[in-house]
Image (cartoon, rainbow, N blue to C red):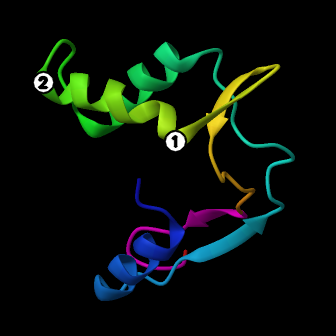
Amino acid sequence: MPGLPELLPVLWEMEIYPDVAMLAPATSTRTLPNLDTAIAMARHFLNIEAGSEKEQRLREIAPRFVVETPEGVTMRGASERPQGVVSWWPGGPA
């Protein structure tokens, strides 16, 4: 998904110069209950139709990209990333 590094240049190109407040990284990586839930979420983000050939391929490769933990599954190599809140007033500052 596009994030802050991709959003800011687009806004600047539109001559929108937003305020950016950076937040501390999340304290833990996202964990999902099981591989099926992770695949369903990936299908949604990638716009893959359930039962399609693309979903079958996703199911074949998904185990390479997740790690099972006592809490469920998480992305292999996932790390904490800082997050930011971007805001601006339409038409410029009030």
The amino acid beneath tag 1 is Phe
Question: Which residue corresponds to mark 2?
Answer: 53
Q: Is residue 88 visible?
A: no
Q: Quadrant of the C terminus?
A: bottom right
Q: Is residue 72 above or below residue 74?
A: above
> Between residues 17 and 82, which one lies in front from this camera angle?
82
Q: Does the magenta stretch include residue 83?
A: yes
> Between residues 45 and 38, which one lies in front from this camera angle?
38
Find numbered disc 1 in the image and state the secondary structure of the residue it sits on: helix
- Residue 31 point in image, percent of width and height: 69, 29
Q: Which residue lies at the image location 82% right of the left edge and 20% below the top edge?
A: 70
Say whether residue 73 is left or right of residue 14. Answer: right
Q: Which residue lies at the image location 64% right of the left edge and 74% below the top edge?
A: 20
For the residues labelled 1 and 2, the Cα–Cα distance comes to 19 Å
Q: In which quarter of the image is residue 90?
A: bottom left
Question: Which residue corresponds to mark 1?
Answer: 65
Q: Residues within 10 Å of mark 2 (few under 14, many from 20)?
A: few
Res. 18 mark: none
Magenta residues (range):
82-93
